[in-house]
Image (cartoon, helix red, strand yellow):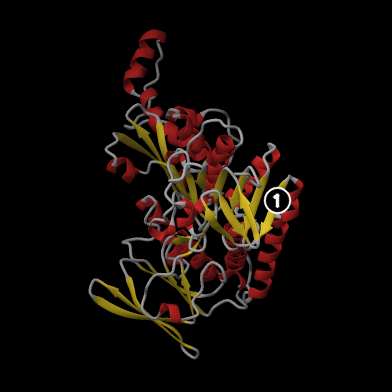
Amino acid sequence: MKYTHDVVIIGGGSGGLSVASGCAQLGMKTALVEREHMGGDCLHYGCVPSKALLHAAHQYAGLAAASSFTTSPAPDLPADMSRITAYIAAVIQSIAHHDSPERFRSLGADVYLAPARFLSPNEISAGEETLSAPKIVISSGSRAAVPPIPGLADTPFLTNRDVFSLPSVPESLIVLGGGPIGIELGQAFAQLGCSVTVVEMAARVLPRDDGELAAIVAGRLARDGIAVRTGTRAASVAYDRTSGFTVQTEHDGHTEVLRASSLLVATGRQANTDDLDLPAAGLEAGRGGYIPVDSKLRTAQKHIYAIGDVNGQFPFTHVAGAEAAVVVRRVALHAGGSMNYRTVPWVTYTDPELAAVGYTEDFAQQEGIQHTVVRQSFANVDRAQAEDAAEGLMKIILDRRGRVIGVQIAARGAGELLAPGIAAVRSGARLSALRAGMLPYPTMSEAYPRAVSSVLGPKLFNPKVRAVLRALFRYRGTGPVSHGAAT
């Protein structure tokens, strides 16, 4: 068969763009097919607009907080959603040129703005064009999953695709789903003055994160005025133009009727594979439309790879980028490479943020791993005290040899604080490595050396060591008067 290209990539999100960039610059004849927007959901409906919204909401909430330092109450200024959406659009535009068709064409890739559909295991249609290649990469992303709640499909509910372009701040909002998306957006709108209720089927919000740290975030949600209904199922949804949304919920056999002007569905994701005609390629989608892959990111057809949200591993942009790097090594360089998902970091961008990498305490317990947990409160970090951010906690998970296998942080700026933890988990470093080097004072990063000192301090500052030193060097001090280790 005579191929039109060396590699065809379906999807112009973060994963597909990275593969296209790498393969094209390494000399492969590369075709990139995107049906809607270059940059994918992350740029247009996910990571970028959500962080811009959160920034605007935090800034707005700061107006009220500033009244603590004024001689008179801060004026009651209503949030202007039109200005916020304009800001979000400007942020997207400032980044979009990196992902433009023109840029990728300048790198040597052929860009087709059309829907893709398999014709055979090596051929796809891109609009009216037929493309073929010995290697194909599927990176078609995902979309909001809509649960089969009676009445929901007949209502004008919101998802991440339209929530960033609202004409005004909703008067009230029900959020179905207490995962990262639902909690981030729920808190943002609450800070903008919206009355928010979150409905989550699990026993707590952020059920995939460390429970103790998730509870810190939940406490802040409560102080922001968010009503959280955990262990609760939405049984039915109705909508009326005058009265808005009515959601009937069930919890422990009891029913409750919730009402709001708007409804946001954030109950998970579904892969964008419906229109690809996977059977024509000899592939089958699994639950949620996801395409199963092996550790080398190969599908059941070994020349076809699936990366990013579509393979159902981790729905994170940085994971898609890492998977893309593996595919470029394998496809363009004919080198080895596989994914290790044990060291995937993630952040929930609430206030405070919740960041994690590696094993949590619960996961280590479930896996039967002998471990210890080092806890460090941010109440003991001077910068946190100075910035009214002392309500936070770091947990460091160590294996039986004292190696760092997990770090979780709930604190302001936790995502920025996670980098040393990521490096330690990836390298299998011992706890003491987190104290290496001199840190400027005061910074939130002091949580790391304080955590290390809480473990290593008692091993050095204790009566046995003092007795040895007194015998060797004739020291005359008594040491601490009260029992405990000095750090």
In the rendered view, would you say 460 is above or below 419?
A: above
Which residue does the image show at 60% across and 54% down from the upper left?
Answer: 13
Q: Is mark 1 on a helix, strand or loop?
A: strand
The residue tagged 1 is 110
Relative side of 461 to 63, left or right: left
In the rendered view, would you say 32 is above or below 176?
A: above
- The front one of 256 and 478 is 256
- Looking at the rendered image, the quarter that the C terminus falls into is top left
Which residue does the image show at 34% across and 60% down from the upper left?
Answer: 204
- The front one of 217 and 107 is 107
Quarter assignment of residue 11: bottom right
Residue 483 lies, in percent from the top left, at 31, 32
Residue 334 lies, in percent from the top left, at 57, 32
Quarter assignment of residue 237: bottom left
Q: Quick check: can you spot residue 80?
A: no
Which residue does the image show at 62% across and 72% down from the upper left?
Answer: 165
Residue 449 lies, in percent from the top left, at 49, 34
Relative side of 166 to 474, left or right: right
Q: What residue type is labelled 1?
A: Asp
